[in-house]
Image (spheres, rainbow, N blue to C red):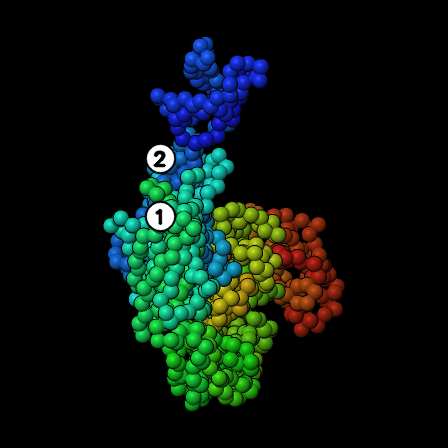
Amino acid sequence: MNGARGVRMVAIGTLNSVDFSEFLSFPAATCFPPETMSVVLRNPLPLSSLDGRAVTFSRSRQIGGMLAFFAITLATTGNLRAETAARVTINSNSGTLGSSSTNTSGAFQVANLSTGGVKITSLTIDTATAMLPDIVFDPAGTAGDPDGKAFQLDSFSGSGTPVHSFESPHDGVGSEDGYEVLRVTCGPSVDFGPGDSMTFSADIDPTSVKGAAGPGPEHSASISGLEMIGATVTVTFSDGTVRTVRTAGVTGSSNTNKMSMALLASDNLATPGISVPGKSSPFTTSTQPTVRVSGPAGASGKVWVFSAALYLAGVPGGGYDIDPYEVNKVIAYGFSDVTIGASGFADVPLSLEWSASTGGIHFVSAVLLNGSLRSSSSDILVIDYDPGGGSSLDGVKPTVPLDLAATAVSAGSVTLGWSPATDNVAVTGYRVVRNGTPVGTTSQLSFTDGGRTPSTAYNYAVEAYDAAGNDSDPSVLAVTTPADTQAPTIPGAVSGLPGDGSAALSWTGSTDNVAVTGYRFYRANTPLTTVATPGFSDGGLVNGTAYLYAVTAIDAAGNESAATSVTVTPEEGGVAGAAVLRVNAGSGGAFVDPQGNAWSADFGFNSGTASSYTNAITGTANPLLYQSRRTVSSSVPLLYDFDLANGNYRVVLHFVEVSTSFGVGSRVFDLVAEDILRVDNLDIFGRVGSFTACVVEFPVTVSDGRLNLSFPKVASNPTISGIEVFQVLPPVVPPTFEQWLAARGLTGMTAVDSDFGGLDNLAEYELQLDPNDAADDASFRLHCEMVPGGCLVKLPPLKPLGNYHLHRGTDLAGLANPVNRIATISRSAIEAMSPDQRAAYGVNDTGPGPRAFYQLHFEPVAD
């Protein structure tokens, strides 16, 4: 007999028997004939207990009068793998088929059914393959109704905390149209081992009801687990195994009307095929179809049939991104048994329903079952049943919408109205075309086309369409917008922040019947510049001087609003110091911007959803800041709260609009700091358009040790990309001359002003002025005025009694040192001046730098 052979055992489960024919052969010269024998083990062995070990099986038998003993050793190679398996159930738990929702706590249930210590490392759920079209995760409440809910971990029996991310934006950009994929990751610090379970909840909405009030018409924004049938679930395990299954219906449960499930294991049954011979899904039929389910002969399972409808009542624009066969709610369902015949398929006649109010669109899927074993869901058939012979794809186009007219025309918009069209089934909506390009759809009998140019001719067409995609012939109209004579509204809430030789101004943006193109900025009634956004910084100012500023809004037609004004007095030191806070909102990581400023990861927020983008951002030298943001749904106001010492601060907020479907007025919210409204009705798109940096700043005083920022919603959901806070330093007030004298111990050297400011008071002028003479004190002052190329230092009236020396330094310390002398006016030069020249004399300093102190010294010269 040959010796035992090593065998790699990779089967999963329990070893019940050994077939010796796999291992035994007899040399031709022996008397033992080839024979097949098997041994049935009395005590089945779990294979997980054999990894890396050897087990010997033996049996004796009488052959040809001889007692033969057979033995075989199975030497395992250490490659045994434990079972990797998981179960994902989507069970919306409460409510009816119409009202139950994955928003409900614990709606998603994940169990690790693995053995041998194998952990779950990640889970993804992809709604793109689900039965209902265009259903998405809606964490921000922007894709469907406003009641968004991000991933909420409701329970976890393992250790650590799984993290989540939303992926595959439905619009390819960001959160506005929701996400098709939710990923839950269990990193190195998370142990999701065999026997552990996790539950969570998240909002899922159909995009067709975008903008509708919750919970959508006929609860269409409440998606149940049943309506998630067909969603793709992928689980990755710690041994590298990846299993992918589509969810299927579940029977025999009190929650069958709200539940779907994916079982992910090595022994999953084969996925069945499903079709209607001679048809390609989706299709329309006027007769009851027969579905063919294919699979292994003898396999049994269920065929699920769902009736669905499209509800759009109250949805803005009559629905969002509506396609043929679009539905958003399952209204009825049923299932029947099926057994695959010997030919590998079974034909199942269907009994579909149709009604005038909901139509006849149905979904059909199949799943194979065998005890506790299940298959993945089949593909899902879409069948539009219309027993009347017509259908949503019947080829009959609607009638022309008549009586097309312009019911309202302004310089910046055109409102159209028309009479209803008819169709053999139903008119789904109306498409508005401007100059040959579609500009929108609506289910109403009117449409407003905004953003138009004054004094411009437009050619409009309105077409009716049905659910099959049939378009009516167009109704056409030519409209010319009038000239724009309407000025924008007055800029509001202008505020000025004084700096050292500068002033920073901000104000609330204006609106216009067409569009605001900019803001004209005035100082002392003289135009300075025109800016595109509400904010401007003016430099080169004289500290201590009050400046009157005014701002107006202008449009493309040259119309200018009335002005809003504010007075700002720059002060030395009245400037924002170093930033005390920089937060990259919506980002999970810190970064350093191109200017070398360090930004922290997002913190201090109360709610909202973080998202990031790769789109190019204009209008900034720091685009990375604007490629992440935090957005919050309307049900939970967005708040930020930071520890901050009491004092004066300048808050700078950074925003960007990334929604390609938004326009002026689509997203509007207020900015509130320390419970005071700072900016009313901020409209990012209205200020700068999309994918452009928008910066807003305002002064804040903190008196309770905390800085509170809030963003109340006006329209759609508030969003923010960055927060900066700068401390405003108290102004540095130069000492009076009396203080300067006292600091140097010179007060005892002053003399009584014997001649009341006369020419012979030399002792007084040696000390620059008499601290006891208020009139002399007032006259002996330097006045500085910034001029092109430097600073004009105006001296007090000169007296021909000696030399005057002008010093300049960057601080008061050492200012009297002659090394700081920049000019000398000699007695002889003063004697040669006229009285007017002495009174108006000044020094033009061409090198003062950003900060300078000036000091005038007198040196008496005898006759």
Q: Amino acid at mark 2?
A: Gly
Give the residue at mark 1: 300
Pick the front one: 730 or 96? 96
Residue 247 visible within the image: no
Q: Position of residue 47 (x, y in %)?
A: 42, 26
Dot 1 lies on which element?
A: strand
- Foreground residue, 756 or 261? 261
Query: Compared with residue 861, is residue 681 higher up or lower down, i.e. above or below?
Result: below
Judged left or right of residue 409, residue 835 is right
Asked where in the image residue 466 lies, by quadrant, the reply is bottom left
Residue at left 44%, top 10%? 65
> Mark 1: which amino acid?
Ser
* Left or right: where 526 falls relative to 254: right
Location of residue 533 in the rendering, given as x and y in whole percent from the top left corner: 54, 69
Q: Position of residue 349 (x, y in %)?
A: 35, 61
Q: CA distance from mark 1 to mark 2?
A: 29 Å
Where disc 2 sits, the SS reads loop
Where 710 falls versus 445 (above or below)?
A: above
**Residue pictured at 61% horizontal, 60% vertical:** 761
**Pointer 2 local density, CA inside 10 Å: few below 14, some 14–19, many at least 20:** some
Residue 58 lies, in percent from the top left, at 43, 15
Name the front one of labels 1 and 2.
Answer: 1
Please tell me whether residue 702 is drawn above or below residue 370 in the rendered image.
below
In this view, 147 is above or below 51: below
Which residue bears the numbered disc 2?
A: 195
